[in-house]
Amino acid sequence: MIFNVITELLGGLALFLYGMHLISSGLQKAAARQAQQLLGAVTKNRVFGVLAGLVVTIFLQSSAVTTVLLVGFVSAGLMSLSQALGVILGAAIGSTLTAQLIAFRLSDYALWAVVGGLIPYLFAKRLRWRHLGEALIGFGLIFYGAALMGTAVAPLNNLPGFAAVLSRLAASPWLMLLVATLFTAVVQASAATVVLAMTLAAQGVLGLEAALAIVLGANLGTTATALISSIALSREAKRVALAHFFFKLGGVLLFMPFLGLYTQLALLTSDDISRQVANAHTLFNVINMIVFISFTHLVGQLTVRILPDAPEEEKVAKYLDESVLDVPELALSQATQELLRIADIIREEMFPRVMQPLARREVDLMQKLRRLDGIVDYIYHAVARYLSKLSRGSLTEEQQLAQTSLLYIANDLEHIGDVVVEMARHWGKIEKSGIDFSPEGQAEIEEMFSRVKDNFALAMEAVANNDETLAAQVVRGHPEILRMEKNLRYSHFQRLQAEDRLALETTAAHTDLINQLLRLNSHSVSIAQAVMGII
């Protein structure tokens, strides 16, 4: 008997967890882009942010993926940390949908859902329908898994030892809370813990108050997933995960002293104990949102104080979260954000330094540029490794092209960093000689550099918006840069013929710099061509 109980309980739990995975994976693949667009549209309003978090999490069935999207928005400066925390509160409400669906007891139709999902999953020609079929199979499995757990739990009432252990746990709600927290942290699915509490309560093995202690533990334990996954990520990711933990911990500490009142409130919502547990799960997150929505700014400030910006963050991939590699749409978006970060380093920190006049040159300029180039190289290799982990078998033709294009763009950006360092080396030769360019030569190089910078900015704007029209502008502008390069050489040689002393002394460095500027623009053109699919 015990063997059968354990087999059905663990088997039901395994099916439930796998069903959750299929639902989340299928819906993310089918609707990730739309979810990203929805979150991006509500970056300025905290209340709308809560609603967006709720809707997105219902559609994606993963508050963890919602968090990944938020980290990207916060890191890019499109959303403040406090606004992101409002979305997190809404996502917590959205994540309670699974328990609500289980409370409808649709297990009789579970296998029909599996069959219904299998048809498009195997035979649909459009990937979106296959992904939706995958999600429907997942729904069937979670209902079937929940039913199996219910069947397994039923005989436990007849086991005196088990009943005694459960009675002792029920007599100590804080201990029950701790056990539920640890269990949820291990299985990494709060819905599984809540459904288990619903099952135990429905079979009379557990009272409602003890079941609600498990619900609170499930809500606290679910923060472990985000905390653990954020360890290797950026400060923004760590702050969002930490704030999520603070919200849940605050809610648990608020609810536990009033567990009896919480139980009475759950009793008012339904006559069915399974529904009472599911409703209590939703109520906790709704009340938690109402209590903490006004304190998101303060919680955000607290996380910044605990985790201040640090120099070592430069060599951390801020956006590359491996948990979304199974969702190519999101993974490609994350890689794009990381490439835009490289572009920002080049545009805002490397370009302004490399063309500084000798009189205003920074001390240890070469060391600073080499350090920045080291960061660019690090991020480039991180992006290349990340993109290589995307399984080409699971990518559409369009996604495969995007993957290859991003690898081309990453390579060009890495080369641009190298070119800037090489330019600085030529400037160093001038500095050591003690002789500057002629005023005319300096002005010509600065004019060409300005045009090259503009083209680079336009190419990266095309990358950011996947805009082929902007990319085409960069490509069409390349012949003009070629003409400018020839004109600059001609002007320089004219000064040489006039025996301009400064032109004679700096001729090698001058022509080398013109060559490097041409290389910079060629890489911008290559980036633009990658956006256009010319690879």
Image (spheres, rainbow, N blue to C red):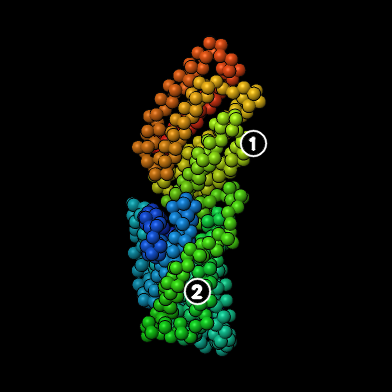
Q: Answer with mark 2 or mark 1, whichever residue precedes in sequence.
A: 2
Q: Is residue 155 left or right of residue 363?
A: left
Dot 1 falls on a residue whose secondary structure is loop
Q: Is residue 363 left or right of residue 289?
A: right
Q: Position of residue 533 (x, y in %)?
A: 40, 37
Quadrant in the picture for the C terminus: top left
Q: Nearer the viewer, residue 40 or 392?
A: 40
Give the answer, above or below, for where 41 lies relative to 528: below
- Residue indicated by mark 2: 251
Q: Position of residue 459 (x, y in %)?
A: 43, 37
- Graded by Cα atoms within 10 Å as few (under 14), some (14 to 19) or many (20 or more), the crowding at tag 2 reads many
* Residue 384 shows in the view: no
Which amino acid type corresponds to the residue marked 1 in the rendered image? Val
Residue at the image position 57 percent from the left and 80 percent from the top: 174
Residue at the image position 35 percent from the left and 69 percent from the top: 112
Dot 2 falls on a residue whose secondary structure is helix
The answer to which quarter of the image holds residue 288 is bottom left
Give the answer, above or below, for where 301 lies relative to 397: below
- Residue indicated by mark 1: 363
The answer to which quarter of the image holds residue 23 is bottom left
* Residue 448 shows in the view: yes
